[in-house]
Image (cartoon, rainbow, N blue to C red):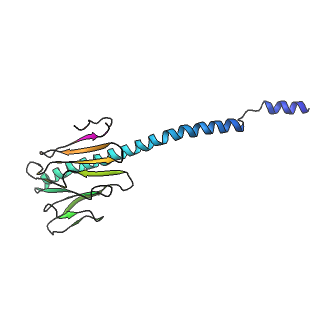
Amino acid sequence: MNTSRTTGRRNQRGFTLVELFTCLGIATALLSQALPSLSKLRQERALRATSEALASDLRFARSEAARMGEAVQFRISRKGAESCYVLHTGARNDCDCAGGQAVCKAPGSNIIKAEWLPTHQPMRLSSNAENLQFQHRQGLVTQTGSIELKLDNGPGIRQVVALTGRVRSCSTGTKLPGMNLCS
């Protein structure tokens, strides 16, 4: 009788504690290798989304100038992690968004749109032009320029605004999939 109980226990299926901890160790090792890649992928996806929104707003400024029949200003404030940009009518530097809220100094100026760079993302905004003015007749830009969003220690995406007001995107640093490298 004692023999049948031992035989029954040996036929039971399951994992031993050693097997369970071995599997857990292997899973932990694999997960520790995958997490940095997932974080980098998430940051690159956020970079692309923010860059596409920036390009869309540049195109929007050009179309609003044509629609309203007056010049539209695209002004960048506070370069770096806490940067923002504002689209407005009126004189060149009448409106600003640097204080956390978009405000205009002159009564004839109106804010069309204001956007702030997400503070929780490790992105930086830089530009060679603080203000771009989209003219209403042909959609031309009085000052051409480029605006770059860049991840800390990673790739970046540059929006290049031509004299005609058209916007094109290219990647800086490392080449991003589906995007040309800036020359």
Rendered location of residue 12, percent (x, y): 77, 32
Rendered location of residue 50, percent (x, y): 31, 49
**Per the image, is 83 magenta?**
no
Q: Looking at the figure, which quarter contains the N terminus?
A: top right
Depth check, front residue: 129 or 103: 129
Residue at the far right: name it: 1
Number of marks in picture: 0
19 lies left or right of 37? right
Look at 16% across and 62% down and name the residue there: 93
Quadrant position of residue 37 = top left
Rendered location of residue 20, percent (x, y): 67, 38
Quadrant position of residue 81 = bottom left
Q: Looking at the figure, which quarter contains the C terminus?
A: top left
Depth check, front residue: 21 or 64: 21
Look at 50% across and 38% down and name the residue there: 33
131 lies left or right of 148? left
Main SS, magenta residues:
strand
Q: Which residues are magenta?
A: 169-173
Q: Is residue 30 above or below residue 149?
A: above
